[in-house]
Amino acid sequence: MIDIKLLEHLETFLTPSRKEKFTKVLAQRTKHFTVATEDVYQLHNTSAVMRTCDVFGIQELNIVEERNSKDIDREIAMGAQKWVDLNRYNHVKDCITDLKAKGYQIVATTPHANDCDIKDFDVTKKSCFFFGRETEGLSQAVLDEADCYLKIPMVGFTESLNISVSAAIILQQATSKLRASNLEWRLTENEILQKRLDWCTKTIKSYEKITERFYETN
């Protein structure tokens, strides 16, 4: 349960512009779509994908680290690590199981015999877009478990895009279609309250002392 009185107290320590920004951003946040990266080697790619998630209102990023485990590059993420929730997994099968339990279909972003062009993608289903390793792409485990396969049309000599570029193209188109629909794609009221509190803790430097004093006097 969220302590509403504590939240309201903490928000008095925010500037009016910061509080307004939180409200505006949270109104556009969604968990209808999420993103998963599988053993991405280059740290800047994972950080850039996190930044892309923030830009297009994706609240959660799932990172599978069976081979490669690194911290987010704060300079490349440009602060997105504060605002996007990060779920880490040591095994891709655990990630897939968890996502399916949450009601997500697994979308493999890769050319496939039964693939779908991004412009024809059905946004009505909760979806997790999986992006694979820089050179190898997605593992067979993801391809086997995928509910659908998504591709970005290309007409040049190059057969693939950088992972962060692919994520940006797919999320821009998918979220645009989602926001133009009549679907209930926004965060729930309780999820918004949780994020307001979470973002306060990440913004207010003396959060712990303020919280301690609040409970001493209330």
Image (tube, rainbow, N blue to C red):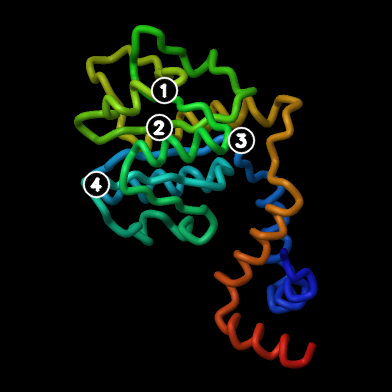
Label 2's element?
A: strand
Q: Marks 4 and 1, Cα distance to the nearest angstrom?
A: 24 Å
Q: Do the residues bearing badges 1 and 2 touch, measured as CB atoms within 8 Å?
A: yes
Q: Nearer the viewer, residue 136 or 89?
A: 89
Residue named by callout 3: 32
Any mark on residue 146, and which?
A: 1
Q: Residues within 10 Å of mark 1 (few under 14, many from 20)?
A: some
Where does residue 123 sit, x and y in percent of width and height? 60, 23
Left or right, residue 63 beside residue 170:
left
Q: Say above or below: 215 vs 177.
A: below
Q: Earlier in the sequence, mark 1 or mark 2?
A: 2
Q: Residues within 10 Å of mark 3 (few under 14, many from 20)?
A: many
Residue named by callout 2: 130
Q: Marks 3 and 2, Cα distance to the nearest angstrom?
A: 14 Å
Disc 3 residue type (three-letter): His
Q: Quarter of the image containing the N terminus?
A: bottom right
Disc 4 residue type (three-letter): Gln
Q: Earlier in the sequence, mark 1 or mark 3?
A: 3
* Residue at 68 percent of width and 51 percent of height: 26
* Residue at 21 percent of width and 46 percent of height: 67
Q: Earlier in the sequence, mark 4 or mark 1?
A: 4
Q: Earlier in the sequence, mark 3 or mark 2?
A: 3
Q: Nearer the viewer, residue 30 or 179?
A: 30
Q: Quarter of the image containing the C terminus?
A: bottom right
Q: Nearer the viewer, mark 1 or mark 3?
A: 1
Q: Marks 3 and 4, Cα distance to the nearest angstrom?
A: 27 Å
Residue named by callout 4: 42
Q: Say above or below: 127 vs 30.
A: above
Any mark on residue 41, and which?
A: none
- The answer to which quarter of the image holds residue 164 is top left
